[in-house]
Image (cartoon, rainbow, N blue to C red):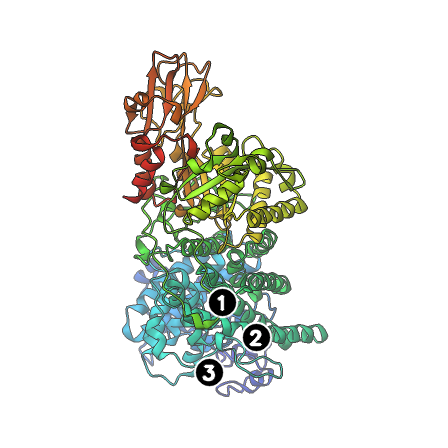
Amino acid sequence: MPGVPTYRGCDACRKQKKKCDMATPACSRCARLKIACVGCGQLRYKFKDQTDLQAVRLSKKARSRAPLQFDAESDSPVSIVSIASSRDSARSGAFASLLDITDPSYDLRCYGLWFKDLPRRMGTNEALDAAAEAMVGFYPHLRRHEQSSLSRGSLVKYVNALQALRTCLNDPQKASNPETLCAVYILLICQGWTGRDFDQKISHGEGLAYLLEATESRQSSDQFQETIQNTLYVPVIMEAIFNPRIRMSSLFSRLKDRAFGPPAPITLSAKKMMSLQIQSLARLPDLLHEPTKHIDDILTSYQRIRIEIPLLKGSLELTDALVSESPTKQSIKTRILYQGSFALLVACALIFNSYLRACGLDDGNMVEEAENMANDAIKLAHDASQYRPLGASFVPLCLIPAWPATDDVEIRQRVVEALRVYQDDFPAATGKGWYFMARWLEGELDRIRSGLGPSPMEDYGKRQWGTVILDGKGNMMCDGETLTSEMVPRSRAWYCPCSCMGGSSDGEQEHHQHPPIAERPPVDANNGYQTRPPPVSHGYMNGVYYPSWLVYKDKTPATLDVANITHIFYAFVGVNENGSLRWIDEHADLIKDVDGEKGALHALAKLKRQNPHLKTIVSIGGGADSKQFCTLAASHNGRQTLAKQVRHLCDRYKLDGVDIDWEHPKNTQEGHDYVKLLQECRNVLPEDTHLLTTALPVGQYILKHIDLRAVSRLVNYINLMAYDFTGSWTSVCGNQAQLHSPQGGLQSTYPELGVCATDGIEYILSKGFPSRKLVFGIPAYARYFPVAEGPGCSTEGAGEMDYCEMPDDWVDNAVVEEASVAAWYVDANSGKGYITFDVPRTVYLKAKYATHKNLGGLFYWTGTGDKPGRLSLVAAGKRGLDE
């Protein structure tokens, strides 16, 4: 006989060797001690030779060979019944032992107080039984911080739980049981503990959403089921923000007035937190997926949260004081409950705040409010860290939106440091997901700022994913490339908001055409907010640089072809190391008679008065006056001084903005200072009244030092200097401004001849920089190489000349390379040799490329170097942009 019946008392009394009165639903001892009464009245079997549950399990082979043993009186297979009963009892007892742990850092009831009722429900649903067994297997690894090295047995239990769950889901009656909901939730928790995802087709969050919809459609008086649903809605809602396959709108009509977290603050004010009602939270994904459609609802929700946050914050401070005075288990539980509720409320507030500002609805206080809430999230992370990992598992929820909500570099760094601390509690895959969500959210905000709207809601399963890992220093790596803060991740769990970041399976990037920018619908003017125009113009730029020294050649601002020009960049005003501005040529700028005015600056202001469509911008620095930038940008006072003086310069000479022409940040620290300098300038140059641009080269050796994602939030345009690819500084001559690298031939021998404009364009766009903020340059001058007869020859005696100084027949007879979009001519008469320059045809093709890539347009160095009439480069570019 394999086993004999033994004690029927509950597990707790049996463990303490106390007599159990076997009262229901709980024995008197368990009721008095307020502990879970598990196993009361169950018949157990004591096995003579087997004390370990694993030893009780018979292999399939053994069971197939051994004959069934029947009891003489009952004719039932005693061995099978006894084993099953013992397994159920052992399983529920093992799970109940986890619930006996009251340490808030490892208390499972942080996931829901109804966890204490689960042992009683085991044995009725195979999915719940298997999920509980998987959690029991994973739990010791969590305590020992060994989630990345799970035992084979633990992983087998998890896989078995997935199989049991699929079996239950195939049964219509079991699929909508509350026990099945519990099983999915437990597996979702285990997945977060381990960072593993064994089902690549559908997430547990999607499964929960489906089951919640099924259970909501049934009328049930089961209080246990309703309690579970209240808890499970929150993780489903959070995942629905990033996973468009989860749609909460179908549940709105069925949702009851349920609240997450404390029903009211513990202050004298007993007003409920309306923003924490399930009905309010369930609308969050739909609001964010179509923000322009629901902009009024977002605004209303944010206004309500503005009132609720101080109330809940005050309540949290009271619980903090209560724990400090009397750190009892109950006071600590209350504190954790309020911390979790505050984290959720701050997360919603930060998301709404970011979306409203991205849509241009900042009422003047939102930037400061975002910084304050980000600081609240950081403080909460610090205060809750003593309850890590489980008692503080809600903290990343508010840290994730805190990172893209602020442009303050110091606050962002503190957020990353806080996330890194909490990442240590979980395996790498789970921790990486937090960074992915933060950068995905920032990508969505950038799309809205650029007028593109949120990511398309295409089939979630068809998106392309890349593999992202963390290196030893905590940097994110994707396909061997370090992910910086401006890159949008390509993980399976979080999709790239711009498919030009989508990676193919072989590691190559696939680029796509952004949809045209759509006008944002007008917002009700009665709500007290002013709509701010987006920082990107809906028209294309066709701008020119105007150097002040050209006034000595009688090429004044009045000679510019203003009919084909949208922006004029006045070059240059110098800088000192303390941040103050200085005139490089004060006589040309302010004294010389120019177009009936004193100085070129006043002449430019006159030209703008005569042509109101023009945008006039002063360019600071330049190639010959950039060495002071590294010193002034490293100083907070220097940056502030420069910002104040450029604002004064704009106001005095009626300029529309400033162009920072620092050539160029040479290392990571200078790149960091460069972003800080742009931030100071943007602080004094509001987006709705002033333009802020910056000039950068195409070379990745410079661009890699700059946080281009941060730059995109500050500037209206990057002017990409897509020229000077060849000259006296190169070993051989070639095309000086080619759009594409020529195919075959000399560049295999001389790699420098393969440098092209698209190198810089594609690199900048790959960092998530909005395409409409990127314009690239056209040289209105030629470079000549007297001893050369074509590309690949010596650069000895190299020089340059304005396009307008070239004979027309050079332009008419130039060789145009359509593939690389470049032109050149060999002069055998005047001794100029090989000459490389742009012609109207190449400029037109570059303009069409800009419209095809949805770029911001073109600019020219210089506007006065152009030819008039049919050979005009500026006119050819304007025609290509407009057609």
Question: Is tag 2's residue or tag 1's residue first in the polypeptide sequence?
Answer: 2
The secondary element bearing badge 1 is classed as helix
Q: Is residue 144 left or right of residue 186?
A: right
Instruction: Between label 2 and label 1, give the one nearer the viewer.
Output: 1
The secondary element bearing badge 3 is classed as loop
Please tell me whether residue 698 is drawn above or below residue 640 in the rendered image.
Answer: above
Please tell me whether residue 144 is drawn above or below residue 479 in the rendered image.
Answer: below
Quarter of the image where the C terminus is located = top left
Rendered location of residue 551, percent (x, y):
50, 32
Question: Is tag 1's residue or tag 3's residue first in the polypeptide sequence?
Answer: 3
Q: Which residue is mark 3?
A: 41
In front here: 529 or 117?
A: 529
In front here: 1 or 689?
A: 689
Question: Is tag 3's residue or tag 2's residue first in the polypeptide sequence?
Answer: 2
Type of the residue with mark 1 = Cys
Q: Do labels 1 and 3 touch, CB within 8 Å? A: no
The 10 Å Cα crowd at callout 3, few under 14, some 14 to 19, many 20 or more, is some
* Mark 2 to mark 1 CA distance (whole Å): 46 Å
What mark, if any, has residue 15 been given in the picture? 2
Q: Quadrant of residue 101?
A: bottom right
Please tell me whether residue 221 is drawn above or below residue 611 in the rendered image.
Answer: below
Type of the residue with mark 3 = Gly
The secondary element bearing badge 2 is classed as helix
Rendered location of residue 358, percent (x, y):
45, 59
Q: Quadrant of residue 85?
A: bottom left
Type of the residue with mark 2 = Lys
In front here: 685 or 441?
A: 685
Residue 427 in sight? yes
* Mark 1 to mark 3 CA distance (whole Å): 48 Å
Q: Which residue is mark 1?
A: 348
Instruction: Between label 1 and label 3, give the one nearer the viewer.
Output: 1
